[in-house]
Amino acid sequence: MTEIYMIKQIDNSRLTREIDVQRTKECMHLLFLGIGCLLILLFLCLQHFRALRSGYETEQLKKELAQLEEMNQRLKVECAHLKDPQRIVPLAKQLGLQEPSSEQIVVWQGGFPSEPAATLVASTDKQLLAAAEGREQTLR
């Protein structure tokens, strides 16, 4: 017995796939839900990294403050050492300086004025223009 095989040529190029609206809506909802979760996660990470950065900056500023306080203390000690009369007197004598006599010392008896001296008010532009026109007329 002989078997016969028949080959059919099937052409599906003209067929279109039917769009499942319900399935498309579900996919879009899941996509938007995933994007929302991702945005929330990114926002939380951003806040966390900002908190870490501000913590590092705070520590850096604390170190800088401690260094500045130490330098301030050293400068105060140096300033006190430089103002020490026991150090200044020998240096002054080496330079040929002497203590002032009682005739050289002047004590200010008058007080300082309680109000500042009267100030002049600046001229306005109109006054300056009028003065300039007056000068031009006198020149003619």
Image (spheres, grey):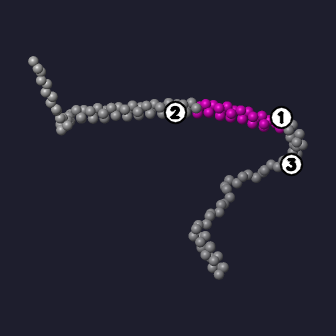
Find residue 104 and name its label: 3
**What residue do we see at 34% from left, 34% from top?**
35
Residue at the extreme front of the image, as rendered: 1
Per the rendering, the mark at residue 54 is 2
Compared with residue 135, is residue 125 higher up or lower down, i.e. above or below? Answer: above
CA separation in Å, label 1 and label 3 = 23 Å
Please name the residue shown 71% across and 32% down the image: 74
* Extreme-top residue of the structure: 1
Q: On screen, 134 above or below 7?
A: below
- Of marks 1 and 3, which one's residue comes earlier in the chain? 1
Question: Can residue 18 be seen?
Answer: no
**Residue 19 position by quadrant:** top left
Amino acid residing under circle 1: Gln
Task: Give the magenta range.
Answer: 61-89
Type of the residue with mark 2: Ser
Determine crowd level at label 2: few under 14, some 14-19, many 20+ residues with C-alpha closer than 10 A. Answer: few
Circle 3 residues within 10 Å: few <14, some 14–19, many ≥20: few
Q: Estimate the spatial distance between the alpha carbons at disc 3 and disc 2, rounded to whole Å.
A: 61 Å
Of the two numbered discs 3 and 2 in the rendering, the one whose residue sits closer to the viewer: 2
What's under tag 3, amino acid-wise? Gln
